Amino acid sequence: MINAMPVPPSPSPGLRIEGLSRRLGERTLLADLNLEVGPGECLALLGPSGCGKTTTLRLLAGLDAASAGRILLDGDDISRLSAGDRRVAMVFQSYALYPHLSVADNLALGLRIRGMAAREREERIMAVLELLQLVELRLRRPAQLSGGQRQRVALARALLRQPRLVLLDEPMSNLDAQLREELRPELRRLLCGGSQPVVYVTHDQQEAMGMADRIAVLREGRLQQIGSARELYEKPANRFVAAFLGRPAINLLPAEGQRQLGLRPEHLVPVETGGLAARLQQREWWGHQQLLWLESARGDLRMLVAADQPLPETLEVSWRPEHELWFDSHSGERLAAS
Amino acid sequence: MKGFPMNTSLVNTLLMLPALLLLAIVFAWPLLDSAWLSTQASSVLTGLAPTANGGANWQRLLGDARFWQDAAGTLRFAVVSVGLELVLGLAMALVLHRPGRGRGWLRALALLPWALPSTVLALGWRWIYNDPYGPLNSLLKLFGAPAYGFLTTPATTWLFTVLADVWKTTPFVALLLLAGLQSIPAELEESLVLEGASPSQILRRLTLPLLRPWISLALMFRLAQALGVFELVQVLTRGGPAGSTESLALYAYLNAMRFLDFGYSATLVVATFLLLLLLTAMGWLLLRRRPLEISR
């Protein structure tokens, strides 16, 4: 056997995006995006619809043309490569399974196009079918599969390609909530921790927090903040990030000096005296917790408390100073704690 | 208010009745009437009164060289022109499907030939082919070529009749196939692009298989129309020269309107219908879904 030549470490492994922009006429769909995703890292692009997350994904795949910027994969500039030459796999929101082909042929088509020999092709397909427990379904057509099974086929097709970068566009949005929760660890196991970076687009903050190592929050084509779920939750860069992450959403109270005070519902506690006086308006009992809708002199509040907490009609509410998040009421930027 | 307590299958039948009745009146009745008439002698010889003559009309049909020649000619015309229309219509649909400015206008423009009445169109073509004054001959003259009688020999007349038909009905095929193309989600193509597929591979591996139901629909429609071709040959060539472009429909028309032999004309109509039925059934069988492509 010949020993493999020692491979020099690649200059900067993983995905690096530099100044990526896309403009369409007057509209800016993505403005000057800069970020890095390490090998095996899963980055979630999170934001409401129209924030530029799918645009970013399509630019990475090469399906749309960038107006400016570079995309580096393991140090190689792939921005000029055609979509077919990038070795990027994408799982579409609709899964994009070829309806006229069986599961096995859905997987085989890409390899056939690349001219892979039948023997190797079938070995690889079988391996991936086994990995995703699709062996028994291999002769079915997409129309004969459930939503979860279709997603697994789409995933299998993406992994089969041995891509340098995996892109997922809302891969769970067509599944029901329970299945989504069940599939998250499996998806993480299959996708993350390999050698390739993973970019995962979602509008669901819980999914982003559950799936990704880091989250990039986008709004109107601009990156708001990038960091771990915990960093984003505890130290949001601005009001938008604070409101987008965390459910029930953060309370924002007007404060003196052009400021707003952000308080998370779970950080509010009822106290005997010395708190903010509030009246109970409504209550949602969730089993493990209850959400209270309160009315106070400083505005309406959502408060999350234990399910068995007895509650009078009027109460006083307090919080710890370290849980206060202060925002500039004009720019929305977070201010240093006062 | 809750739903009406009604027998839904009865309601369904009742709701379909007007449409069925209409079909019966405009389709089934004339057909049955023709079938009956094909067993009758009804010509100037009988004073146009139908008189049963057993299978004499059908016997005559089997031995009628003109019928067989017309049937072969009509079939050849239909197969060649529908074949050309499918290929050109697909190309046109692919072009019209591409995103771009002014696509709406282009589509409207492309449909124009189809929107023109066949008779008007045939008159137009007759003028275009006119020897020696038509535009085509003016064009030839411009290049110093002698005037050419486009509609003088059987071979060229047939060819230019096919061209006129292709010109008119290709947009119809294109429109049908365009609808088919638009029903294919864009992600399917994008997914193949990411797999490294070339445009021709996308066409062969994805677009054509998914377009197959639409192609067979266009084929059925066009085949039925082309086998019944009448106005075009009547106006453009009158079946000439020497009967070389006479279609079955034209022969049936001549029997009824010129030879006043309604019995035989009805026989021809029924025979044409049976031929059409046979061909469309064959086409349908051919284009039915193939079994799964299985890779082991």
Image (cartoon, rainbow, N blue to C red):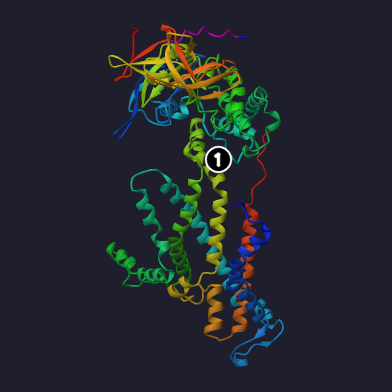
Asked whether residue A7 is drawn in magenta, I would say: yes
Q: Nearest the camera: A122 or A69? A: A69
On the image, the x and y values in percent for residue B163 come to 44, 63
Residue extent of the magenta highlight: A2-12
On the image, the x and y values in percent for residue B204 come to 54, 42
On the image, the x and y values in percent for residue A95 come to 55, 33
- Number of marks: 1
Residue displayed at 54% across by 69% down: B228
- The 10 Å Cα crowd at callout 1, few under 14, some 14 to 19, many 20 or more, is some
Residue displayed at 33% across by 48% down: B102
Q: Is residue A166 above or below residue B108?
A: above
Three-letter code, disc 1 = Arg
The residue labelled by disc 1 is B205
On the image, the x and y values in percent for residue B107 come to 39, 53
Q: Quadrant of the C terminus of chain A?
A: top left
Q: Is residue A255 above or below residue B205?
A: above
Asked whether residue B232 is drawn in magenta, I would say: no
